[in-house]
Image: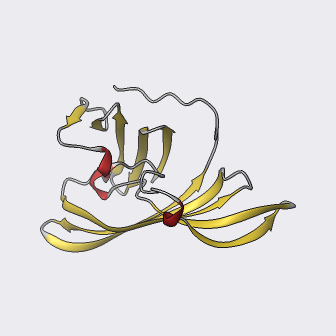
Amino acid sequence: MKGSLAVSGPDYRVAASFTFEDGTATVDHRFVKGKGYVRFDRDKWQTLTGFTAAQSMSPFALVSGAAAVRFVGAEKVGGKTLYHVEIPSVPFHPSLIPASNLTKEVVTRGVMQLLIDAAGRPVSGTATIEGTGRVSGQLQEIIIELNLTFTKVGQTVTVSAP
């Protein structure tokens, strides 16, 4: 899986491409002005009824304050001191995996480990999302591990409805 995530306040866009043995599949998910949208491959956009900000895949949506951030340590990278922190985060939900035999996806834990600079801006990180789902009816564990690179931090990013 390769993808991108754009965030502007509470609005965000997740785009991902999956490579399978029998081909590729894509998913695009957006949350704009309180409404959720999803599109698989080149199908029509669907409005997600009942999708709320509480289900957000924005990487920092679950950080409600300083108590949600765990300091892990400091390290020197390229002569600069960076800080390793851990936050609760679900930047990609298993329901977006484009597999027709995957149902009843549930996230049980999501955590993001970040390297941030002295101003608190993210430089890089990893995310681990754990959960369960049914694959052809059989209960299975789902673990998604993401490597994250941050670009355009602090710049204007536009996320629009489809």
Residue 32 picture location, percent across and down: 36, 32
Residue 128 picture location, percent across and down: 45, 66
Residue 42, placed above or below residue 18: above
Left or right of 91 in this view: 76: right
The one of 119 and 77 positioned closer to us in this rendering: 119
Q: Residue at x 42, y 39 (%)?
A: 10
Residue 44, by quadrant, is top left
Residue 153, by quadrant, is top right
Residue 105, placed above or below residue 53: below
Left or right of 22 in this view: 81: right
Q: Residue at x 66, y 50 (%)?
A: 121
Residue 90 picture location, percent across and down: 40, 58
Left or right of 159 in this view: 31: left
Residue 115, placed above or below residue 161: below
- Quadrant (top left/top right/bottom left/bottom right) for the N terminus: bottom left
Left or right of 103 in this view: 129: right
The one of 17 and 22 positioned closer to us in this rendering: 17
